[in-house]
Amino acid sequence: MCWFEPRYTNDALAKHNEEMEDKGPLEGIDHETAENRKEETDAHKDKDGMWWERTPVMSPRSCEIGELWIWVDRGDPDPPADAVDPEILAGLAYDRTKLPAPPVDLKPNADRNVVNLPTKIEFSEPLDRVWTTASLVNEQAGVNIAATTVAEPVSLRIDAGTEYAEPSSCTYDLVQADGGYQVDSDGSGCNITYRKSSGEGAYSMEAQIVWDVTWSPTASPDGTPQNDDLPDGLSVSEQDVTVKEIQTVVR
C-alpha cells in the first residue's frame, strides 16, 4: 500500500536532488535520473505549488511501479489519485491498533475446577476502549490531517475446549462498570459446566472478545464517528483448565 503526499516545494526538491546526486549512484541517485529530475524542476521554476511524492506505507515493496513525483499547483482542486486523506489514515491506524487479550478469571480457579460445578466468568480488571491515531503534518504545504480509530469491547465468547462440557460455549454482553467494561456471568443463565475430569491433562479454554471499531477524521478518540464501518476487532486468549472429580462417601 502507498499514497501520494505533498512533500517539497520546487526549490526544495531541486536542492534535495542535488544533494542526492552528490552522494553518488550507490548512496544517492544515478546521473541520468538526476538529469531527468533537474528537467522536471526547471520546468516548474518560479511556480507556486508542491511536488507530491509516492510514499510506501509499510515498506518500499508495498508500492506498485509508477510515477514517483507529481506536480500539483497550489489551489488545484484535484489532488493526485491515491492522495493521502483521513480515510486512508484511518485504515493505517486500524492496522496498527493492538487489542489486549481477554483478562479472564475463573471461579473455581483454572487449576482447581470440579466436575459438575458451574464455571463463573469475570475480568481480573475492567477493559477500556483502545484507540490509535495516524496523522500527516506538513507545515510547508499547509497539510495537517489525522484519523483516529476507536475499538470498544462489546461481547465475550468462552469455549470450553472439550465436548464433555454443558454448554460447550457461552457468549456474554459486556457492560460498563468501574470505569471500563466488565463481564460477570453470575446469574447470566450460561455457565460452562464440565461433566468429565481432565485426567492427568487439562482442557484448553478459549476466550474471544469482539470489538466494535469506528473512526473519526480527527486526532481525538472523541471525534464524531464516520458512517463507513471498519471490520470488527477480535482478541483471543487461552488457558488450561484442570478439572477434577470430588470423591464422596454415601452412607
Image (cartoon, rainbow, N blue to C red):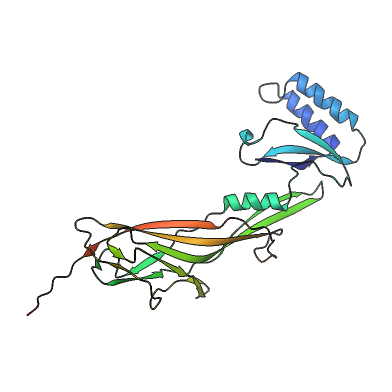
Which residue is found at the position 56% from the left and 58% from the top? 232
Which residue is found at the position 63% from the left and 49% from the top? 92
Residue 146, horizontal then vertical, whole percent = 71, 55
Residue in the foreground of this view, choosing between 13 and 222:
222
Residue 64, horizontal then vertical, whole percent = 67, 33
Residue in the foreground of this view, choosing between 130 and 78:
78
Residue in the foreground of this view, choosing between 196 and 202:
196
Q: Is residue 212 left or right of residue 122?
A: right
**Which residue is situated farthest in the bottom direction here?**
251
**Which residue is situated farthest in the right direction here?**
46
Q: Is residue 28 left or right of residue 74?
A: left
**Total number of numbered discs in the rendering:** 0
Which residue is found at the position 65% from the left and 40% from the top? 1
**Which residue is situated farthest in the top direction here?**
32
Residue 205 placement: quadrant: bottom left
Q: Is residue 225 left or right of residue 107?
A: right
Which residue is found at the position 9% from the left and 78% from the top? 250
Residue in the foreground of this view, choosing between 210 and 148:
210
The C terminus lies in quadrant: bottom left
Residue 132, horizontal then vertical, whole percent = 61, 56
Q: In the image, is residue 211 above or below residue 68?
A: below
Residue 111, horizontal then vertical, whole percent = 26, 63
Residue 203 placement: quadrant: bottom left
